[in-house]
């Protein structure tokens, strides 16, 4: 037995004794009672961490009828179409380890693979391959350039949006050579693919996305690279995390409308589906998406959230990016196609392109379902397709593919599989990003993690993708944030009452980065594993 484990054991035994004394005094509960709002990856990892710490008295309230939230795997043939998360950013994180143990990793992919390997489809328009090459030579230098600016020139990075910085480079590029109007129109079309690469990656309209995000976001792995999961993917990861959580902890179809902190008793009461829940909680951990907080925080918290919290909620970005899966009975694309970049050009296909043509920039072949194309929409494109009916989408996609393949025999897709995230009141979008106004105000995502306190003690806590200082947007950030808040609650409970003071900083690494001076004691050995 190692020295540290022995120390933990002694402390636990010590706790037990103290607990007994407390109970004799009529203490109502020995362990804290905790409510978790949301059963996405953050809520599940909160619950799982509580179990590791020996706390089993918690309730999970989930508005949907399923776990996963923005992780959403829909069964298809012998796999799952991942409506949400699909990639894992880097190997230096616990989700990679889970996925690797379960054999769910398929491949290492470059973030630009779908553009680099794209088949540019332009039908019988007058587009020359060498113009495409000229443009790709120009854009291939931009990604490294912007990363370098973000690293070495923070002031510039904070000031510019991607749209602004790209527009400057693009104007310069157009001046370098004597391009014809026709060529310029082709470049404009190609620029849309480049724009949507950024927009999909960051789930943002590029006119608000700050270049500073390239410094703040960090997965400690090689740049522009992540792991693709296989046909099971996040379904397997989610089930693995959820496995030890007792089924009776879950309350599905239960939307938390109000979280009321009683400043006299320090207890918290919830209003769920219009009813006051009788249980009084010691801690509530909220994992609602930033989109939900933006829209509903006024109603969700009594008393209202502190001013700085509201400022962070308002200034940090929450964006849109989604996948729409189009199934055809037979592929009309060649069997070596990786992705298709439709290239309708203004002045060739029509005088003016419409929004659907401008936003449909990439369709990727699903490797294990080769008759399915996954169309990626981001920024304003996400709202656009969410607003379209299925029939309309089918018609528009058929027309575009017929034009881009110059083949009127292409049939309409047989099926569309999609989730309209922007219309789901419990999710309201895809993930958070760094806005220009946020970067200029020096607001870090971690400010969203600062708890609501009573007399210096955390009461209402915040986990979720958007609360992680360096892995916001990702499932990893969500997972780590859930553990962080479980630790925070348990540390506060045992730390202040029993003087529990373990000094292992690994789990709490993230908390220490939140602008808090107070030294929070914490437990980090999983008690149940001793
Ligand atoms: C299209 C798309 C692609 C993505 N791709 C990737 C990827 O490749 N890799 C990656 O790492 N990440 C990816 N992400 C992001 C990732 O899915 C999210 O960051 C992560 O799933 C967020 O988890 P969460 O637990 O923080 O939030 P959520 O998943 O939103 O969980 C919160 C839960 O709380 C519930 N809820 C909210 N409010 C209430 C309330 N008031 N009462 C009760 N319940 C409530 C919601 O229903 C939800 O289930 C992608 C997302 C999308 C949309
Ligand atoms: C650019 O091309 C046009 C027509 O192709 C020509 O008239 C003009 O002189 C060229 N300008 C330069 C600076 O080469
Ligand atoms: C792909 O298509 C080509 C030509 O149509 C054909 O010769 C080849 O066998 C196909 N390959 C596979 C793996 O189906
Ligand atoms: C989509 O519809 C919503 C409301 O139904 C509207 O506010 C929004 O502007 C629409 N967006 C687009 C891009 O059409
Ligand atoms: C808790 O640990 C910190 C160092 O990590 C130490 O400074 C502090 O005095 C400890 N508190 C107690 C009550 O032991
Ligand atoms: C701290 O925690 C980590 C992970 O839980 C563990 O591997 C490590 O041994 C711990 N260190 C100490 C000093 O307890």
Image (cartoon, rainbow, N blue to C red):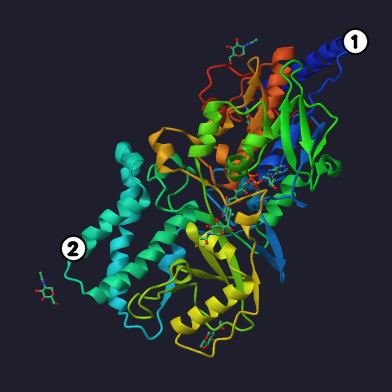
Of tags 1 and 2, which is closer to the observer? 2
Left or right, 199 with respect to 174, comes to right
| Numbered circle sitting on residue 24 | 1
Q: Position of residue 421 (x, y in %)?
A: 62, 56
Mark 1 → mark 2, Cα distance in angstroms: 82 Å
Q: On the image, which quarter does residue 172 sit in?
A: bottom left
| Numbered circle sitting on residue 475 | none
Q: Can residue 85 be seen in this view?
A: no
Left or right, 396 with respect to 135, comes to right
* Residue shown at the point (58%, 17%) measured from the top left: 519
Left or right, 416 with respect to 26, comes to left
| Numbered circle sitting on residue 175 | 2
Q: Which of 133 and 17 is in front in this view?
A: 133
Q: Position of residue 305 (x, y in %)?
A: 61, 28
Image marks 1 and 2: residues in contact by CB distance under 8 Å: no
Q: Nearer the viewer, residue 143 or 40?
A: 40
Q: Quadrant of the C terminus?
A: top right
Helix, strand or loop under label 2:
helix
Q: On the image, which quarter does residue 386 sit in?
A: bottom right
Helix, strand or loop under label 1:
helix
Q: Taking 60 as reference, is 16 above or below it?
A: above
Q: Quadrant of ligand 4?
A: bottom right
* Residue shown at the point (61%, 84%) measured from the top left: 330
Q: Taking 402 as reference, is 375 above or below it?
A: above
């Amino acid at each position: 037995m190692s020295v540290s484990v022995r120390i933990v054991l002694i402390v636990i035994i010590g706790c037990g004794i103290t607990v007994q004394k407390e109970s004799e005094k009529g203490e109502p509960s020995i362990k804290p009672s905790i409510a978790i709002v949301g059963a996405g990856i953050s809520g599940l990892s909160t619950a799982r961490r509580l179990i590791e710490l020996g706390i089993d008295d918690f309730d999970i309230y989930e508005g949907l009828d399923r776990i996963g939230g923005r992780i959403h795997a829909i069964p298809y043939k012998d796999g799952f179409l991942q409506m949400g998360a699909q990639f894992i950013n880097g190997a230096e994180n616990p989700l990679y380890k889970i996925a690797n143990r379960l054999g769910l990793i398929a491949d290492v992919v470059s973030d630009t693979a779908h553009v680099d390997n794209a088949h540019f489809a332009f039908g019988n328009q007058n587009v020359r391959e060498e113009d495409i090459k000229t443009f790709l030579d120009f854009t291939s230098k931009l990604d490294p350039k912007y990363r370098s600016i973000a690293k070495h020139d923070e002031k510039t990075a904070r000031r510019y949006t991607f749209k602004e910085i790209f527009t400057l480079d693009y104007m310069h590029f157009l001046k370098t050579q004597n391009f014809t109007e026709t060529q310029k129109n082709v470049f404009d079309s190609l620029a849309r693919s480049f724009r949507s690469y950024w927009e999909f990656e960051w789930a943002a309209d590029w006119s608000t996305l700050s270049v500073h995000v390239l410094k703040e976001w960090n997965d400690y792995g090689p740049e522009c690279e992540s792991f693709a999961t296989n046909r099971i993917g996040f379904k397997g990861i989610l089930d693995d995390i959820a496995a030890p959580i007792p089924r009776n902890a879950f309350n599905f179809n239960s939307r938390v409308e109000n979280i009321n902190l009683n400043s006299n008793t320090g207890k918290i009461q919830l209003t769920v589906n219009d009813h006051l829940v009788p249980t009084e909680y010691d801690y509530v951990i909220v994992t609602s998406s930033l989109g939900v907080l933006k829209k509903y925080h006024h109603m969700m918290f009594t008393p209202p959230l502190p001013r700085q919290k509201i400022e962070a909620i308002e200034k940090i970005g929450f964006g849109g990016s989604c996948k729409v899966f189009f199934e055809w009975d037979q592929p009309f694309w060649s069997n070596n196609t990786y992705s298709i970049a439709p290239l309708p050009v203004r002045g060739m296909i029509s005088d003016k392109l419409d929004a659907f043509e401008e936003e449909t920039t990439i369709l990727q072949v699903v490797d294990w379902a080769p008759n399915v194309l996954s169309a990626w929409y981001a920024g304003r494109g996400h709202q656009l397709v969410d607003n379209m009916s299925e029939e309309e989408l089918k018609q528009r996609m058929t027309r575009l593919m017929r034009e881009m393949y110059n083949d009127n025999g292409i049939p309409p897709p047989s099926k569309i599989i999609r989730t309209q995230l922007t219309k789901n009141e419990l999710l309201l979008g895809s993930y958070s990003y760094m806005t220009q106004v946020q970067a200029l105000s020096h607001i870090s995502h971690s400010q969203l993690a600062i708890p609501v306190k009573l007399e210096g003690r955390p009461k209402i806590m915040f986990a979720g993708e958007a609360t992680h200082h360096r892995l916001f947007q990702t499932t990893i950030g969500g997972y780590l944030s859930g553990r962080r808040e479980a630790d925070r609650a348990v540390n506060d409970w045992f730390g202040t009452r029993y003087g529990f003071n373990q000094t292992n900083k690994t789990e709490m690494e993230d908390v220490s980065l939140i602008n808090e001076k107070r030294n929070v004691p914490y437990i980090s050995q999983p008690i149940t594993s001793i």
